[in-house]
């Protein structure tokens, strides 16, 4: 790991109680502009379906809007849930986005459904077969987005994929287990581990990606990153208060409740059983939250432990201004850019 750690952002378009879900989508676009001004390296969006908590269901559309609204920051997905789609259509979509934002588009591909079985079936009744074809579909998309030849004997080798572009999106494989790491290694592609879901398998996944890596023309050496939850505030006390929104949401998810995020004051008033209180304490102990130096130190520790030169930060807070302030504090702690975020208190 180099002395300079690059920071990027994953935004999940979280829904907030009392706000329209459409607001969450517009807030994501606004946050991308602000993270660009702060000096973040990438801005990624996720894909979920039928969720009361996370409402970004069409990342390819959202990324195109962000690409058109920014000029420097890399933009992309973490990710497109590939079993729902035909690989050729994904390649076409991201060649269009590459035309909108040449040289700064990332296409993160995931195997998970991002929803329950019923919704997954509605999205693609043949999705189970597509899950089995995930490695081959990733291979084909990597070729179709870069004009590289398909595998020898491929029945679709003669297809012309448009629009043609001078460059090509960066194709990443996403995962929260060893499987994605092995697929990325076999195909010679970058890998992102979803550590915000569960950090425990991160070290092994990165080790596998590096040890099994087969060099590709674009990626002669392995490249990897991790997406980690972090929430920074001006004081530890304020961060603890704001984190109540995230803690309650994680607790609800544990018991199968998917709901819009609560303001911290409401989350703190929610009654808790002794077992639930213990789970909240565990969530807080496992998460990165606090003032700027505390969060920066914990992010650097993880980057050093996992051998990373880049960390992707996911932040949930009820008010967009608090999310914006968190990213500003981290940007200052890592010297990403000088100057404050413009009018942060006026967002959302």
Image: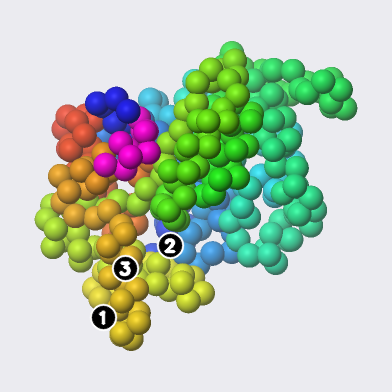
State whether residue 3 is above or below residue 317: above
- The 10 Å Cα crowd at callout 1, few under 14, some 14 to 19, many 20 or more, is few
Q: Nearer the viewer, mark 1 or mark 3?
A: 3
Relative height, residue 35 to residue 337 (above, below): below
Residue in view at x 58 percent, y 20 percent: 215
Residue 81 visible in the shown view: yes
Name the residue beneath numbered marker 3: 282
Is residue 306 inside the magenta stretch? yes
* Cα gap from disc 1 to disc 2, whole angstroms: 20 Å
Disc 2/disc 3 C-alpha distance (Å): 24 Å
Of residue 44 and residue 334, the one placed in the foreground of this image is 334
Residue at point 29%, 25% (across, down):
2
**Res. 160 mark:** none
Q: How many marks?
A: 3
User: Crowding at label 2, few (<14), some or many (≥20) Cα neighbours within 10 Å?
Assistant: many
Magenta stretch bounds: 301-310
By secondary structure, the bulk of the magenta-drawn segment is best described as helix
């Amino acid at each position: 790991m180099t002395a300079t750690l690059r920071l990027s952002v994953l935004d999940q378009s979280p829904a907030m109680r009392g706000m329209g879900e459409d607001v969450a989508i517009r807030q994501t676009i606004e946050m991308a502009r602000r993270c660009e001004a702060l000096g973040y390296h990438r801005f990624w969006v996720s894909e979920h379906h039928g969720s009361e908590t996370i409402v970004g269901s069409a990342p390819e559309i959202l990324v195109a809007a962000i690409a058109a609204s920014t000029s420097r920051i890399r933009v992309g997905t973490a990710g497109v849930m590939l079993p729902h789609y035909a690989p050729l259509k994904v390649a076409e979509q991201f060649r269009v986005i590459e035309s909108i934002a040449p040289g700064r588009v990332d296409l993160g591909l995931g195997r998970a459904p991002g929803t329950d079985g019923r919704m997954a079936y509605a999205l693609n009744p043949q999705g189970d077969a597509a899950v089995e074809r995930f490695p081959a579909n990733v291979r084909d998309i990597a070729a179709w987005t870069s004009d590289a030849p398909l595998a020898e004997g491929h029945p679709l080798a003669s297809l012309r994929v448009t629009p043609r572009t001078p460059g090509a999106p960066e194709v990443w494989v996403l995962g929260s287990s060893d499987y994605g790491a092995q697929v990325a290694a076999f195909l010679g592609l970058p890998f992102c581990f979803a550590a915000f879901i569960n950090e425990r398998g991160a070290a092994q996944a990165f080790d596998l990606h590096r040890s099994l890596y087969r060099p590709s023309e674009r990626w002669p050496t392995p490249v990897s990153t991790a997406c980690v939850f972090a929430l920074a505030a001006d004081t530890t006390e304020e961060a603890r208060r704001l984190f109540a929104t995230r803690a309650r949401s994680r607790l609800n998810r544990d018991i199968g409740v998917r709901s819009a995020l609560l303001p911290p004051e409401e989350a703190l008033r929610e009654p808790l059983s002794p077992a639930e209180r213990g789970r909240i304490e565990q969530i807080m102990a496992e998460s990165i939250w606090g003032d700027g130096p505390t969060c920066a130190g914990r992010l650097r520790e993880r980057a050093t432990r996992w051998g990373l030169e880049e960390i992707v930060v996911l932040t949930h807070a009820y008010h967009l201004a608090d999310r914006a302030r968190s990213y500003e504090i981290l940007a200052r702690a890592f010297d990403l850019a000088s100057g404050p975020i413009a009018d942060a208190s006026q967002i959302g």
